[in-house]
Image (cartoon, helix red, strand yellow):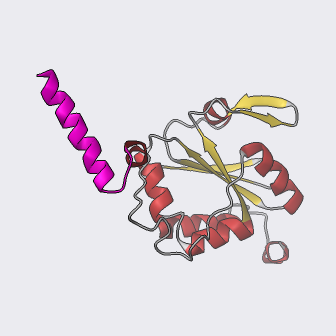
Amino acid sequence: MRKSKLLTLLLVMLSFSVAGLTSSEYAAGKDNNKSENPKNEPGKKIDWQTYDVGLKKALDEDKHVFIDFTAKWCGYCRKMEREVFTDPRIIDLLNNDFVAVRVDGESRKELDIDGYKITERNLAVREFGVRGYPTFWFLKSDGSKIGPIGGYRPTEFMLEALTFVKEKRYDSTATEENTEED
């Protein structure tokens, strides 16, 4: 019985190797036989920042912050990475009009936000109330919260949400004149 389990495990590992995958790459959702950027120019990616660095950059550049709260085990997070965050329109919006921040909601990595130390995990749960992944938050350039979007969202939905925030349509006091200046 033990030999048959070992043989099955070896066959599964061999099938990953034949397919060009290691078991860790398979678990991470990577496939070496496919382009990671099928709809995009080779090498063009979102410029993800850590939360602490991203907040400073957003304030310096007067840009909104887009936060992607993610987890390594999250299948829909990987689906967002493959299907949405590879779209050239999404990449351009995030790189040009936002500061894109990625936070691993399971990480114990410590962030230093102007002397306030917090782990990525505690940032997700305590500061942003994240209860599931993926969760996306929008912030103003000063770090004040605009609002979240939860769960997997297709490209067209994300384009509309990013444009909505970019154009400050969430702000009922914004006028066309002061949104065009930005």
Number of marks in the image?
0
Residue 79 in magenta? no
**Image point 36% across, 56% down: which residue?**
20
The location of residue 54, given as percent across then percent down, is 77, 51
Q: Nearer the viewer, residue 173 or 168?
A: 168
Dividing the image into 4 quarters, which one contains the N terminus? top left
Q: Is residue 143 visible?
A: no
Apparent side of residue 97 relative to residue 135 in the rendered image (left or right): right
Residue in the foreground of this view, choosing between 146 and 59: 59
| Residue 46 horizontal/vertical position (percent) | 64, 63
Q: What are the residue bounds of the magenta stretch?
A: 1-22
5 drawn magenta: yes
Left or right: residue 49 compared with residue 43: right
Q: Is residue 92 left or right of residue 99?
A: left
Q: Residue at x 58, y 75 (%)?
A: 89
Judged by its main secondary structure, the magenta piece is: helix
Quarter holding the C terminus is bottom right
Query: On the image, which quarter does residue 69 sit in?
Result: top right
Instruction: Give residue 98's quadrant in the image.
Output: bottom right
* Image spot of residue 94 (x, y percent): 66, 65
Identify the residue at horizontal 52%, vertical 41% (top origin).
71
